[in-house]
């Protein structure tokens, strides 16, 4: 099993450009999450999906949109990138279907995004 | 709203026991307290999870007092490879995920 995979691993954007970060999990998990981690900081939840077809805002949703394409895939879109969105983005999944329950989360390797 | 507090950093030496405490208030009464480990350039990795009292697995122990206002991660006989950032995670009474800011643990030879 690959676990949680993310693409791309690195990305550089110019201010105003758009892009989509892809995430997939092969563990048949119900819940999926998108986090951002700024240098030297902890994790901040952007959006999560407790089950296929549902999404909810986390702590820092502004400037992002998400799509739970199917049970396996959860994408994060930046419509108009800003330098403040420079960060490392982690996708995670967990078995539970509540989304906000603190069941074990499994993380991907991250996408390092720089916005110039 | 729940809030967590962890020490920013800690130092220890190989072979010692390390205890990292996370203070948390207004957490959900029926939710787990979970600890994660993160190495540079990697995603966090689950270490241990508990609801109350003491939980032990092959890598760590977790102590949670009856009032659940704190939790202590205990790493026995640490090695250089335990150098990492450690995060506590709780759920608050509105079922939101609350991550600690992380404790950077440095193990010296």
Image (cartoon, coloured by chain):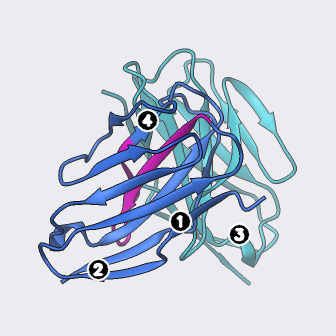
**Which residue lies under the disc numbered 3?**
B82
Discs 1/4, front? 1
Residue A6 — which label?
1
- What residue is shown at x 58% (from left), y 61% (from top)? A108
* Disc 3 with disc 2 on a shared chain: no
Residue A95, image x, y percentages: 66, 35
The kind of secondary structure element at disc 3 is: helix
- Chain ID at mark 2: A
In front: B85, or A12? A12
- Seen as rendered, the residue at the extreme front is A69
Colour assignment, chain B: cyan
Q: Which residue is mark 2?
A: A114
Residue A37 locus on image (x, y percent): 38, 63
Q: Which residues are magenta?
A: A30-47
Do residues under tags 2 and 1 come within 8 Å of each other at their CB atoms? no
How far apart marks 2 and 4 lie (CA) works out to 26 Å
Label 2, secondary structure: give it: strand
The residue that mark 4 highlights is B97
Using the image, determine if residue B18 lies above or below residue B78. Answer: above
Q: Are marks 3 and 1 in contact (CB under 8 Å)?
A: no
């Amino acid at each position: 099993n690959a676990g949680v995979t993310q693409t791309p691993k690195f990305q550089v954007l110019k201010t105003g450009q758009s892009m989509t970060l892809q995430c997939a999990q092969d563990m048949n998990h119900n819940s999926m999450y998108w986090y951002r981690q700024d240098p030297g900081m902890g994790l901040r939840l952007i959006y999560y999906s407790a089950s296929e077809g549902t999404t909810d805002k986390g702590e820092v949703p502004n400037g992002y949109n998400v799509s739970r394409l199917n049970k396996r895939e959860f994408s994060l879109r930046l419509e108009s990138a800003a330098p403040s969105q420079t960060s490392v983005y982690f996708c995670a999944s967990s078995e539970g279907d509540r989304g906000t329950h603190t069941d074990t989360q499994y993380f991907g390797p991250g996408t390092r995004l720089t916005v110039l | 709203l729940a809030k967590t507090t962890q020490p920013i950093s800690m130092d220890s030496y190989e072979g010692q026991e390390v205890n990292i405490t996370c203070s948390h208030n207004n957490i959900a009464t029926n939710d787990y307290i979970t600890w994660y480990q993160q190495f540079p350039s990697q995603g966090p990795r689950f270490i241990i999870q508990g609801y109350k009292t003491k939980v032990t697995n092959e890598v760590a122990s977790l102590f949670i007092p009856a009032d659940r206002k704190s939790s202590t991660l205990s790493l026995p006989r640490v090695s250089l490879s335990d150098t990492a950032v450690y995060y506590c995670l709780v759920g608050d009474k509105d079922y939101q995920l609350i991550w600690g800011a992380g404790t950077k643990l440095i193990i010296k030879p």
